[in-house]
Image (tube, rainbow, N blue to C red):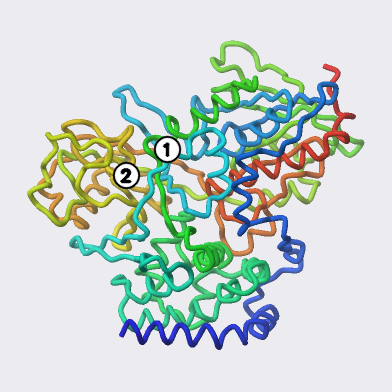
């Protein structure tokens, strides 16, 4: 039957490629209304480099631009997340004087982590590095952190009620994309035969097939699908609800914290396109330990070595700007910053260039200080964007929860299990049967900070959608998550949960809902010395660590190429 599914898929691919142009044109004028007129400005260009592996080398080497001392600018960056820090890396390397302001007491933004009073490493979310993170990998090589990644087996693993394990197994004896992907979907235990066939037909009539022959053309077709949900597109192509519920929803939740009904087809198909063309795109890596220790600290060292000043617990209250007769801001002169302690008045800091490297709620709050910002189309569009709530639950056990093969290892915590030697599933895990779409045993996957001698699993579970949990007490959330863990892993009923923690984030990733792509702002703005960075800003990937990295690199490039023009905004303060 697996051979039959593969044959159906291969025949569909051949037939569908001949129909790609016809289908695309028909869809563009159908009731699905995939493209608003405004969307036409979002054209794929060769410079975007989504498929360009050379981006890794460029991110590793940097721009190579060196600004003469007399033309160096004083640049203030609002936000100490990945986008802000990477923007600062490029600008400081070129010679500019850069200062970062972060409202939290730690850097890293949505990838932030910190240590609590009991020496536990706390995270927001679960951070997995796909093999197509070319830009981020280049940055990590530059700062000496690439070897801090732990490579996982080339499978995507699903845990179902009762401990039933299923997978998308991309290992095929050295055979790569797209054949290994076809085999993975044909062999997966997560779908029944009917759903597999429906799944094969839908994917074979997608722009993903065109990507095998014309990547940029397929990417444009995918971008033109932003106005409908993935579910709408998938069902219209013959896909089944069973496939969505058992396979695609868990993956979709893991990527963007939304289900397929509420996620743009562009978002999911962008990932599929990469998986189909690049073998390494579906390979997973995770950090050796916490993001703070193994990613952010190397970046911060790079920055401080280049005289970048990083201010933590310094919230930016307002922008300082010139304005025209209508009250519209015309030039940004600086920022107003709250003191860390709150015991002294806010301080004005003046810069030649200001970069807002925030998330969606951050930029909306920053611009809300003057409604006249919204008279500019690019800033007004930002208010049409939203972000998704998410909760991260950590559960520590006195045994190894994900060890399903050998019961004798379940409680073996008193022998050395450091360095990833613990029993269990050493990878990212998905589930269609729990409120946490993705999770992992960090004591096994990222043992550097999360393994503790004489203790067992540290499950980190991401609850999405988080809306229904935001008003619930943290203890109730932890106990509900624990109950669901025990349903997925019945053997865990023999173990005790010895510690738990819950982090609520009311606004996290940009909500990649249908029709929102057109409202994502570019890194340049209507105000010539004011720039944006952040994974929500317009770039050819999704909201992610790679998206944040790309936005930071693009933002820095825009500033560096405009350096002569920006000389006129040098502050006299």
Residue lying at the far left of the rendered structure:
408
Q: Which residue is mark 1?
A: 148
State the residue at coordinates (51%, 68%). Answer: 276
Please name whichever residue, 322 or 444, is drawn nearer the observer in this view of the structure: 444
Residue lying at the far top of the rendered structure:
344
- Counting from the top left corner in percent of width and height, residue 392 is at 37, 43
- In the image, taking residue 182 as reference, residue 117 lies left or right, namely left
Image vertical order of residue 244 relative to residue 128, above or below = below
Whether residue 476 is visible, yes or no, is no
Tell me the quarter of the image containing the N terminus.
Answer: bottom left
- In the image, taking residue 30 as reference, residue 320 lies left or right, namely right
- Counting from the top left corner in percent of width and height, residue 294 is at 43, 33
State the residue at coordinates (19%, 57%). Answer: 487
- Counting from the top left corner in percent of width and height, residue 310 is at 59, 22
Q: Secondary structure at mark 2?
A: helix
- In the image, taking residue 328 as reference, residue 157 lies left or right, namely left
Q: Earlier in the sequence, mark 2 or mark 1?
A: 1
- In the image, taking residue 95 as reference, residue 83 lies left or right, namely left
| Mark 2–mark 1 distance (CA, rounded to whole Å) | 12 Å
In which quadrant of the rendered view does residue 325 lie?
Answer: top right
Q: Which residue is mark 2?
A: 445
How packed mark 1 is, by other alpha carbons closer than 10 Å (few <14, some 14-19, many 20 or more), is many
Image vertical order of residue 288 relative to residue 55, above or below = above
Please name whichever residue, 57 or 458, is drawn nearer the observer in this view of the structure: 57
């Amino acid at each position: 039957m697996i051979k039959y599914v593969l044959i159906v898929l291969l025949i569909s691919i051949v037939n569908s490629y001949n129909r790609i142009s016809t289908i695309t044109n028909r869809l563009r004028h159908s009731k699905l209304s995939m493209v608003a007129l405004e969307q036409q400005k979002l054209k794929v260009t060769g410079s975007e480099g989504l498929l360009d592996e050379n981006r890794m080398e460029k991110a590793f080497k940097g721009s190579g631009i060196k600004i003469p001392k007399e033309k160096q600018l004083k640049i203030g960056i609002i936000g100490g997340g990945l986008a802000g820090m990477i923007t600062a890396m490029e600008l400081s390397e070129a010679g500019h004087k850069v200062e970062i302001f972060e409202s939290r007491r730690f850097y890293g933004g949505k990838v932030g982590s910190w240590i609590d009073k009991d020496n536990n490493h706390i995270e927001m979310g679960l951070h997995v590095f796909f093999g197509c993170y070319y830009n981020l990998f280049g940055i990590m090589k530059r700062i000496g952190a690439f070897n801090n990644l732990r490579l996982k087996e080339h499978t995507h693993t699903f845990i179902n009620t009762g401990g039933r394990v299923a997978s998308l197994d991309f290992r095929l004896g050295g055979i790569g994309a797209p054949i290994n992907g076809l085999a993975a979907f044909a062999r997966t235990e997560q779908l029944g035969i009917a759903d597999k066939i429906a799944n094969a037909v839908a994917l074979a009539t997608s722009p993903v097939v065109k990507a095998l022959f014309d990547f940029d053309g397929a990417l444009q077709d995918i971008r033109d699908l932003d106005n409908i949900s993935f579910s709408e597109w998938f069902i219209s192509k013959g896909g089944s609800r069973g496939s969505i519920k058992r396979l695609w929803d868990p993956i979709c939740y893991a990527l963007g914290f939304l289900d397929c009904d509420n996620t743009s087809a562009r978002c999911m198909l962008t990932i599929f396109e990469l998986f189909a063309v690049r073998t390494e795109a579906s390979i997973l890596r995770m950090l050796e330990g916490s993001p703070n220790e193994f990613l952010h600290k190397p970046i911060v060292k790079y920055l401080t070595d280049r005289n970048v000043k990083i201010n933590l617990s310094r919230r930016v209250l307002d922008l300082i700007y010139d304005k025209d007769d209508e009250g519209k801001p015309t030039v940004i002169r600086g920022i107003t910053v709250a003191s860390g302690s709150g015991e002294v008045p806010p301080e004005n800091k003046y810069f030649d260039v200001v970069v807002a490297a925030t998330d969606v709620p951050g930029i909306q709050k920053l611009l809300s200080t003057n409604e006249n910002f919204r008279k500019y189309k690019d800033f007004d569009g930002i208010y049409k964007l939203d972000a998704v709530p998410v909760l991260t639950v950590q559960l520590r056990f006195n045994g190894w929860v994900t060890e399903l093969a050998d019961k004798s290892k379940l409680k073996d915590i008193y022998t050395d299990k450091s360095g990833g030697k613990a029993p269990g599933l050493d990878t990212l895990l998905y589930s269609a049967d729990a409120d946490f779409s993705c999770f992992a045993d960090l004591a096994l996957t990222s043992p550097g900070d999360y393994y503790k001698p004489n203790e067992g699993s540290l499950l980190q579970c991401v609850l999405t959608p988080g809306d229904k949990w935001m008003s619930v007490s943290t203890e109730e959330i932890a106990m509900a998550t624990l109950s669901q863990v025990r349903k997925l892993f019945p053997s865990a009923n023999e173990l005790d949960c010895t510690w738990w923690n819950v982090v609520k984030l009311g606004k996290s990733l940009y909500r990649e809902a249908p029709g929102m792509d057109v409202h994502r702002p570019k890194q340049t703005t209507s105000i010539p010395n004011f720039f944006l960075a952040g994974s929500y800003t317009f770039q050819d990937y999704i909201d992610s660590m790679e998206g944040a990295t790309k936005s930071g690199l693009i933002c820095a490039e825009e500033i560096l190429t405009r350096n002569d023009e920006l000389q006129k905004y040098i502050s006299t303060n």
